[in-house]
C-alpha cells in the first residue's frame, strides 16, 4: 500500500516513504508516512482492521 501526499515543506506531491509501527498491546500496526525529499512526517495510516465502521441503531418498531 503506498500513499501520495502533499508536502508543505517541499511544495510538491510526493510518493511517501512508509515505516510500519506496531501498536502496543494489540496485533495491529500503523504506517507512518514521511516525505522522501525532506523527511517531514506527513501523517499515519492504520491497518484496514482498525477502520471504524459507522453503524446506526436498529430502527424501533
Image (tube, helix red, strand yellow):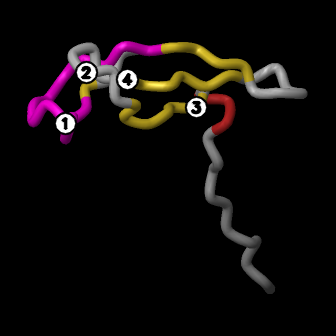
Mark 4 nearby-residue class (10 Å; few <14, some 14–19, many ≥20): many
Q: Which residue is at 37% across, 23% downward?
A: 34
Q: In which quarter of the image is the C terminus?
A: bottom right
Sequence-earlier tag: 3 or 1 = 1
Question: What are the residue bounds of the magenta stretch?
Answer: 5-18
Q: Main secondary structure of the magenta part?
A: strand
Residue depicted at 67% across the width and 36% down the height: 50
Within-10-Å neighbours for mark 3: few <14, some 14–19, many 20+: some
C-alpha gap between disc 2 and disc 3: 23 Å
Question: Distance from label 2 to label 4 (Cα)?
Answer: 8 Å
Task: Give the residue number, with chain letter if any, for mark 1.
Answer: 9
Identify the residue at image location x=36%, y=34%. Answer: 42
Task: Using residue 13 as the reference point, say whether residue 25 is left or right of it.
Answer: right
Residue marked by disc 2? 38
On screen, 16 above or below 58?
above
Q: Do the residues labelled 1 and 2 touch (CB within 8 Å)?
A: yes
Amino acid at each position: 500500500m503506498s500513499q501520495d501526499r502533499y508536502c508543505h515543506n517541499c511544495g510538491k506531491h510526493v510518493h511517501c516513504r512508509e515505516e510500519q509501527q506496531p501498536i502496543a498491546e494489540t496485533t495491529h500496526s500503523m504506517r507512518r508516512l514521511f516525505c522522501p525529499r525532506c523527511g517531514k512526517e506527513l501523517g499515519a495510516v492504520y491497518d484496514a482492521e482498525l477502520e471504524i465502521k459507522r453503524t446506526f441503531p436498529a430502527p424501533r418498531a
